[in-house]
Amino acid sequence: QVQLVESGGKWVQVGDSLRLSCVASGRYIAAYAMGWFRQAPGKEREFVGTISWTGDAMYAESVKGRFTISRDNPKNTVYLQMNSLKPEDTAVYYCAAATALSDNSGDYDYWGQGTQVTVSS
């Protein structure tokens, strides 16, 4: 079992930057692909980005060039750096672990509880 806990979400203004963290426990996440998803009120959960155990990353088009995922395997932690935030980035952000790189939420076995990001104009 892998337990994931996100943190760092808060209320920010348009154009601000924010870094989310996801700390894992239970197992080392070095062998897992780690993804970030988000869910806005009234909308389905959507893919944000993911990073493989080797550091290869892929992103949703809506965040490409603004968001960056990184991982610190010895710390069992994954980060989501978000720059140039927009109101449409407002959502609950979740991290998740999968055995392979994927943009499909169904491929992820473990999920955190989420952290709220609100971007105000």
Image (spheres, rainbow, N blue to C red):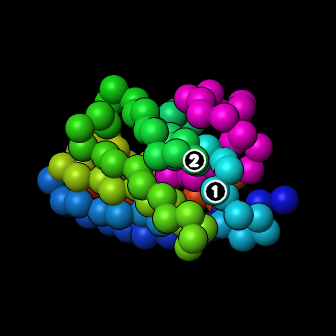
Residue beneath the point at 40% across and 33% down: 59
Residue beneath the point at 43% across and 69% down: 8
Q: Nearer the viewer, residue 68 or 41?
A: 68
The verdict on residue 106 being magenta is: yes
Give the residue type that dot 1 points to: Ala
List the residue tagged with mark 2. 53
- Give the image location of residue 44, x and y in percent: 57, 31
- Give the image location of residue 6, x and y in percent: 56, 65
Classify 10 Å Cα crowding around label 2: few (below 14), some (14-19), many (20 and above). some
66 is higher (above) or lower (below) than 19? above
Quarter of the figure that contains the N terminus: bottom right
Q: Is residue 22 left or right of residue 66?
A: right
Which residue appears farthest toward the front when viewing the image? 54
Residue beneath the point at 31% across and 36% down: 63
* Label 2: element kind: loop
Residue beneath the point at 33% across and 26% down: 61
Dot 2 and dot 1 residues touching (CB under 8 Å): yes
Q: Is residue 37 left or right of residue 20?
A: right
